[in-house]
Image (tube, helix red, strand yellow):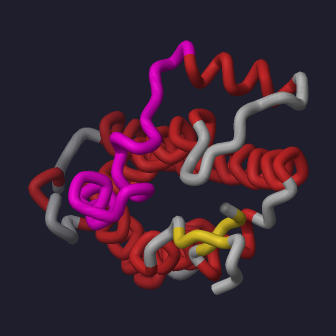
Amino acid sequence: MEQNEVKVWDPFVRIFHWSLVLTFTVAYVTGEDLEVLHNNAGYAVLGLVLLRIVWGFVGTRHARFRDFVYPTAEVRGFLRDTLRQRAQRYLGHNPAGGAMVVVMLLSLIITTVTGIAFLGAEDSAGPLAMFAGSPEWSREMLEEVHEFFANLMVLLVVVHIIGVLVESRLHHDNLVKAMFSGRKRA
């Protein structure tokens, strides 16, 4: 570790992040064609999200929700200051990044739970097979909600990447490198 760097992202956060990138990508691109792989990747996404939620309460300082969940007014102020190129630098997640984490986790929970419910309703399979025999309209609704939130996640990922690039440029930090190494400039 260089003298002017500090540890920010613990191994769990970094492994979670890149595992989620991989499993969500696999689930998204296999949705229509490779059902078994799609379902298994979806279960992996849900498992990762549940572990991350637990880690958000018991993990290291910058992994905890209390370190990066800010009031809405503070998120708006941070975004306004970012547009003016004078936003404060944060060692952990900034207010916008923290809000994005929460929105992404919620979107992933909705995506996976509706996917599992749809699997139960459509194929009488999985832990929610009790939905087997559901009316056609409810199966269609589950499928539509599942697809909507999966597509919303793609939009959120794009916004997340743009935010990472803007923040990296504005504060002269390489946030992608930091998510591999766990270290940021002090």
Residue name at image x 67 percent, y 17 percent:
77
Q: Nearer the viewer, residue 118 or 107?
A: 107
Q: Residue 142 location in percent, x, y?
A: 37, 43
Task: Give the image quarter of residue 83.
Answer: top right
Provide the major secondary structure of the magenta segment.
Answer: helix
Q: Is residue 67 above or below residue 122?
A: above
Q: Nearer the viewer, residue 173 or 65?
A: 173
Q: Which residue in the rendered view is the most extreme toward the front?
A: 3
Where does the C terminus fall, quadrant-wise? bottom right
* Count of marks placed on residues: 0
Q: Nearer the viewer, residue 71 or 89?
A: 89
Q: Residue 160 location in percent, x, y?
A: 69, 49
Q: Which residue in the rendered view is the most extreme toward the left?
A: 130
Q: Is residue 107 above or below residue 6?
A: above
| Magenta segment | 50-73
Q: Nearer the viewer, residue 131 or 17?
A: 17
Q: Which residue in the rendered view is the most extreme toward the top?
A: 73
Where does the N terminus fall, quadrant-wise? bottom right
Q: Residue 90 location in percent, x, y?
A: 63, 45
Is residue 58 part of the magenta span, yes or no? yes
In the image, 121: left or right of 164? left
Task: Give the image quarter of residue 55.
Answer: bottom left
Is residue 169 visible to us here? yes
Is residue 35 visible to us here? no
Residue name at image x 82 percent, y 55 percent:
168
Residue name at image x 34 percent, y 40 percent:
66
Residue name at image x 87 percent, y 45 percent:
170
Is residue 41 part of the magenta span, yes or no? no
Q: Residue 180 location in percent, x, y?
A: 64, 80
